[in-house]
Image (tube, rainbow, N blue to C red):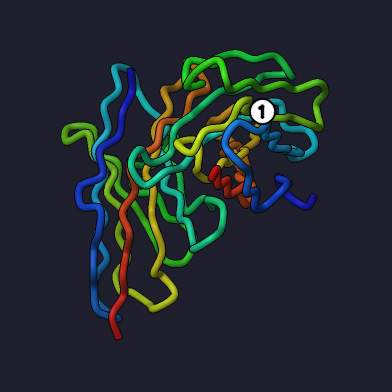
Amino acid sequence: AQSVTQLGSHVSVSEGALVLLRCNYSSSVPPYLFWYVQYPNQGLQLLLKYTSAATLVKGINGFEAEFKKSETSFHLTKPSAHMSDAAEYFCAVKTQGGSEKLVFGKGTKLTVNP
Amino acid sequence: DAGVIQSPRHEVTEMGQEVTLRCKPISGHDYLFWYRQTMMRGLELLIYFNNNVPIDDSGMPEDRFSAKMPNASFSTLKIQPSEPRDSAVYFCASSLRLGAGPNTEAFFGQGTRLTVV
């Protein structure tokens, strides 16, 4: 069964600094991978997704993620953090061609300090 | 489209009472998911439907939980009787078949915050 591990339940960065949120997945077959963002008292919103096309995926709000099969990773990055990026971020995995189950990691809460 | 609509946004109920959460998916989507979010367990998939038919309910915690989808535009999640440990945020999401095409991701509602006292 597929699973997702997000390293670091809390990450704190300064405004303007690099954002790096880590995600490792486990899947016996090629996966689809997703990053979602959740603002307080809101639902989840898609940031970006990997579906076996380009390994470097660009999303909304300046975020991007790189699929690395050898490392089973899909880390999320943004070159320069903005105060509005403060939120909780979730990585999710679904196996291609299989069940429609979308399995989420535990989430990483990002704090951006002025 | 207004997106996935959930009601109520907040629900406070007493232990032992029946609770019904409602969801209206995005028109045209043929998959509907119910998730539960807690601090301890994160986001858990409870059940999902395809074309109104329950496909996988292995995440439903126990018989007190039931979900229905009587038509393509409406689903309910019912807890009877409710217990304090059911307190959580419940999300409904809908999608086309998850995949590579545009807009094939899961779209989430705003959630229902349930408190059982």
A78 relative position to B38: left or right: left
Examine the rendered structure and indicate whether residue B109 appears above or below residue B105: below
Front-most of residues B104 and A84: A84
Could you tell me which secondary element the residue under label 1 belongs to? strand
Question: To which quarter of the image does residue A33 belong?
Answer: top left
Q: Is residue A81 left or right of residue B117?
A: left
Q: Is residue A48 above or below residue A113?
A: above
The amino acid marked with disc number 1 is Lys
The percent coordinates of residue B90 (x first, y second) are 56, 41
Mark 1 belongs to which subunit? B
Residue B62 position, x and y percent, is 50, 18
The answer to whether residue A1 is seen in the rendering is yes
Q: How many marks?
A: 1
Q: Which residue is mark 1?
A: B78
- Residue A78 in picture, x, y percent from top left: 32, 65
Q: Is residue B102 visible?
A: no
Residue shown at 63% from the left, 25% from the top: B80
Q: Residue at x 47, y 66 (%)?
A: A61
User: Where does the image place residue B57, in percent across and percent down from the top left?
Assistant: 54, 16
User: Which is nearer the eye, A56 or A33?
Assistant: A33
